[in-house]
Image (cartoon, grey):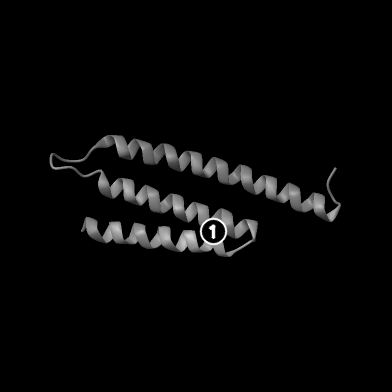
C-alpha cells in the first residue's frame, strides 16, 4: 500500500514542478509550491514506517512543515496583494 503513496507523491511533485516552471503568474506559482510541499509531506509520512513500527519523528516534521507552509503562504499572498495594489496605484 505504501508504494501507491510513493507513486502519488512522485506524481504530485512532478505536476508541481511543471506548474512552477511553466507559468509566470505568482498565484499559480504559490499554489504549485504548496502542492510540492504536500508531495514532500506525503513522501515523509509514507517513508516513516519502519520494520519495528512507526517512527514518530517524520510525523512531527510533517506537522511542523504544515504550520510553516501555511504561514509562509499567507505572508506571500499578503505581499502579492500589496504589490498588486501598488502597481494599480491604490496603495499608500
The image shows a total of numbered marks equal to 1
- In-front residue for pair 22/45: 22
- In-front residue for pair 21/55: 21
- In the rendered image, the vertical position of residue 1 relative to residue 92, given as above or below: below
**What residue do we see at 69% from left, 50% from top?**
80
Q: Image quadrant for the C terminus?
A: top right
Q: Relative to residue 12, is residue 21 drawn left or right?
A: right
**What residue do we see at 38% from left, 47% from top?**
41
Q: Relative to residue 74, is residue 10 drawn left or right?
A: left
x and y, in percent, of residue 87 in the image: 81, 53
* Corner quadrant of residue 27: bottom right
x and y, in percent, of residue 79 in the image: 69, 45
**What residue do we see at 45% from left, 43% from top?**
66
Q: Relative to residue 65, is residue 42 drawn left or right?
A: left
Q: Residues within 10 Å of mark 1 (few under 14, many from 20)?
A: many
Q: Secondary structure at mark 1?
A: helix
**What residue do we see at 32% from left, 46% from top?**
44
* Corner quadrant of residue 65: top left
Residue at the limit of the structure toward the left, as seen here: 52
- In the rendered image, the vertical position of residue 21 relative to residue 40, given as above or below: below
Q: Image quadrant for the N terminus?
A: bottom left
Q: Relative to residue 80, is residue 54 drawn left or right?
A: left
x and y, in percent, of residue 46 in the image: 27, 50
x and y, in percent, of residue 2 in the image: 23, 55
Residue at the limit of the structure toward the front, as seen here: 21
Disc 1: which residue: 20
Amino acid at each position: 500500500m505504501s508504494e501507491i503513496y510513493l507513486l502519488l507523491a512522485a506524481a504530485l511533485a512532478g505536476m508541481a514542478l511543471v506548474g512552477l516552471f511553466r507559468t509566470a503568474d505568482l498565484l499559480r506559482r504559490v499554489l504549485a509550491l504548496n502542492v510540492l510541499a504536500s508531495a514532500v509531506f506525503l513522501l515523509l509520512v509514507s517513508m516513516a514506517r519502519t520494520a519495528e513500527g512507526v517512527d514518530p519523528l517524520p510525523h512531527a516534521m510533517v506537522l511542523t512543515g504544515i504550520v510553516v507552509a501555511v504561514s509562509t503562504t499567507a505572508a506571500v499572498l499578503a505581499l502579492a496583494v500589496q504589490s498588486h495594489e501598488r502597481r494599480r496605484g491604490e496603495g499608500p
